[in-house]
Image (cartoon, rainbow, N blue to C red):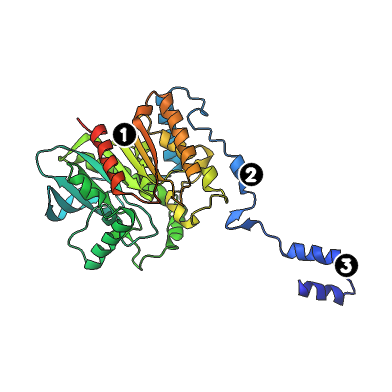
Amino acid sequence: MKNTVICLLLFGISLTASAQEKVETVSMRYETQNDMPLFYQKMKENLTYPMAWGNSAIRNFEKWREEARKTLLDCMLPAPPATAFDKKVIDTEQRNGYRAEKILFSVSEYSRVPAYLLVPAGNGPFPAVLLLHDHGAHFSIGKEKMIRPFDVDSLILADADNWVHQCYDDQYVGDYLASKGYVVISIDALFWGERGRKEGARYESQQSLACVFEMLGRSWSGTISYEDMYTADFLASLKEVDADRIGCMGFSMGAYRSWMLSALSDRVKAGVAVCWLTTTEYQLSPHYGRGKGDSNYANVLPGLRRYLDYPHIVSIACPKAMLFFNGRHDKLFPVPAVENAYSQLHTVWNSQNADDKLITKLWELPHFCSKEMQAEILSFFNKQLSK
């Protein structure tokens, strides 16, 4: 601004106080604040969600589910090409009442992924649960957050034990379920664990990875969900598994993955989501705060908000059995947002006379998956996946 004033004076132009204020105003203009466009509220007001159940012109629920799923898949962009799974067992460990396997299988033509598979002792086929790990801005481990690793470096085991202490109340969810008679599988999502960044974990690289996917006409978030779908198909193909009794469960980003998978895959008969549910209205509200934008790349699908909000996507799972938990003291998902989403879900399940299959509950906890929660999750699966 000083240079501007000097130039004007050189030309013999004197500035009044009012004119100087105008110059300063022009030089200080901006149109984004806190990484948000100043017109974001108007953008939100333009979201009408025309594909949501109740908004859509389709009145037959099954037909609506079919079309809403097609819309969701379209926004996920193309799927990785499917291929034969070609399972290989790398190592095994006998545990109390079940066997742990480290395996490799082809989740698509693009990727051959490591996984942990837990198989109960006795004669199958058994009910099964696909466990979907969280984000946590912690990328050095993925599947190890859900199933206790073995034959690994002591640092990885310590990392996993510490994470399970921090988020899962010192209990590996996978080992807990396997000890109760469930086949359990968990893979690394792309960017976590053994599918991580060669140069080392770096938070900011999520944005670059997501950008590369979109430049190639695909979606990183969509690819994670597609791989979860293929993993459910793989699980159903195993001789130890009763393909009619498969559930899925996740915490935090794993919860997002769980209800996405429940909406997308008919393999899944019952889904559990702990601490990840909101609406766009609350998610993009300065009053309730926003998570770091680059972490959201793992759950952003191009153009989807033109048609569906988060609870509308979950509704595609109806009338399946679904369980949603959240903490009243969860700073990432405030109570008003969660209650609003729960209300929308109950409206849909009620409309299909299936509200007895939808469980929603708030706990006096922060962003956390406690042993008490896990006990109720086991009871839920025992009821919904029984013969």
Quadrant holding the N terminus: bottom right
- For label 1, the crowd category at 10 Å Cα-Cα, with few meaning under 14, some 14 to 19 and many 20 or more, is some
Residue 122: horizontal and vertical position, in percent?
9, 41
Residue 382: horizontal and vertical position, in percent?
23, 35
Residue 17 versus residue 43: which sits nearer the camera? Answer: 17
Q: Type of residue at label 2?
A: Lys
- For label 3, the crowd category at 10 Å Cα-Cα, with few meaning under 14, some 14 to 19 and many 20 or more, is few
Res 34 label: none
Disc 2 or 3, which lies upstream in sequence?
A: 3
Residue at x-position 46% and y-position 51%: 332
How far, Cα to Cα, is label 2 from label 3? 36 Å
Label 1 SS: loop
Quadrant housing residue 93? bottom left
How far, Cα to Cα, is label 3 from label 1? 72 Å
Residue that carries the numbered disc 1 in the rendered image = 266
Disc 3 or 1, which lies upstream in sequence?
A: 3
How far, Cα to Cα, is label 2 from label 1? 37 Å
Residue at x-position 49% and y-position 38%: 340
Q: Type of residue at label 1?
A: Asp
Residue that carries the numbered disc 3 in the rendered image = 16
Residue that carries the numbered disc 2 in the rendered image = 42
Disc 2 or 1, which lies upstream in sequence?
A: 2
Whether residue 218 is visible: no
189 vs 50, left or right, is left
